[in-house]
């Protein structure tokens, strides 16, 4: 196996483990569904199965029902925390986060990590933005509710909803593009500013500002 391929596998393993750690923050025995991981991380089923088998063999996860679901172990949580706390150093199973940060997906806020050292114009992963994907989703839902009440022109309403769908796709992507997010937010702002004078429009614009901040824009 080539070194590049081995590194790709290590990155995938880490992404899956970080995903499991995030989904288990409120319940360390939370069951993670393999199908959900495959869809949200965009991982081919065969690649994911081999990844889970490796993580299970190393004691970082435990299977619940065959390979269809699993839980993260205490060792798995500790390894994620170690990797994020000391991004310049490799862990027992993973590369230094600082060396592969463009390829790593991190959900939620990473306290103490030094991953946000990328150029402003680069295509960045969720890791570099330190955003709470669920918070962004909640803000998008609030934006949609605002549109329901603003009574925009049909063309403006359709355009705004299309932009929201694009933003939602970006937060679900393993590698959201800052340029796409920025353009979508600008388009939404333009539409909402056209409804100036409405308290709802002002609140919606505030939601856009919060989303931009979460994406590091």
Image (cartoon, helix red, strand yellow):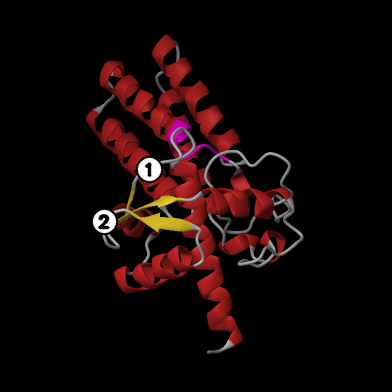
* Mark 2 to mark 1 CA distance (whole Å): 31 Å
Residue 192: percent from left, percent from top = 42, 25
Whether residue 109 is visible, yes or no, is yes
Q: Residues within 10 Å of mark 2 (few under 14, many from 20)?
A: few
Residue 140: percent from left, percent from top = 39, 31
Which quarter of the figure has residue 31? top left
Looking at the rendered structure, the number of numbered marks drawn on it comes to 2
Q: In the orientation shown, which residue stands out farthest toward the left?
A: 154
Residue 170 belongs to magenta span: no
> Which residue does the image show at 55% across and 28% down from the upper left?
209
Residue under numbered circle 1: 168
- Rendered image: mark on residue 65: 2
SS label for mark 1 = helix
In this rendering, the answer to whether 173 lies above or below 55 is: above
Residue 134 belongs to magenta span: yes
Which quarter of the figure has residue 79? bottom right
The reply, left or right, for residue 9 in relation to residue 90 is left
Question: What secondary structure prevails in the magenta region?
Answer: helix
The reply, left or right, for residue 148 in relation to residue 82 is left
Residue 157: percent from left, percent from top = 28, 31
In this rendering, the answer to whether 204 lies above or below 77 is: above
Residue 59: percent from left, percent from top = 50, 61
Which quarter of the figure has residue 143? top left
Marks 2 and 1, the one that precedes in the sequence = 2
The reply, left or right, for residue 120 in relation to residue 194 is right
Please provide the residue range marked out in magenta: 131-136
- Tag 2 near tag 1, CB within 8 Å: no
């Amino acid at each position: 196996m080539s070194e590049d391929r081995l590194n790709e596998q290590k990155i995938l393993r880490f992404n899956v483990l970080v995903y499991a750690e995030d989904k288990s923050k409120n319940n360390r025995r939370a069951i993670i569904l393999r199908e959900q991981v495959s869809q949200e991380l965009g991982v081919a089923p065969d690649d994911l199965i081999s990844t889970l088998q490796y993580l299970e063999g190393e004691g970082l996860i435990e299977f619940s029902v065959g390979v269809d679901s699993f839980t993260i172990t205490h060792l798995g949580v500790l390894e994620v925390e170690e990797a994020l706390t000391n991004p310049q150093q490799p862990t027992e199973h993973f590369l230094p986060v600082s060396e592969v940060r463009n390829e790593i997906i991190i959900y939620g806020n990473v306290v103490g990590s030094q991953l946000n050292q990328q150029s402003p114009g680069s295509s960045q992963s969720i890791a570099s933005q330190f955003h709470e994907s669920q918070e962004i989703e909640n803000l998008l839902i609030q934006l949609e509710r605002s549109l329901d009440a603003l009574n925009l022109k049909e063309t403006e309403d359709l355009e705004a909803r299309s932009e929201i769908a694009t933003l939602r796709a970006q937060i679900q992507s393993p590698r959201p593009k800052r340029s796409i997010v920025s353009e979508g937010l600008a388009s939404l702002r333009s539409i909402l500013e056209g409804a100036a004078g409405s308290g709802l429009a002002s609140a919606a614009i505030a939601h856009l500002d919060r989303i931009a901040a979460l994406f590091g824009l």
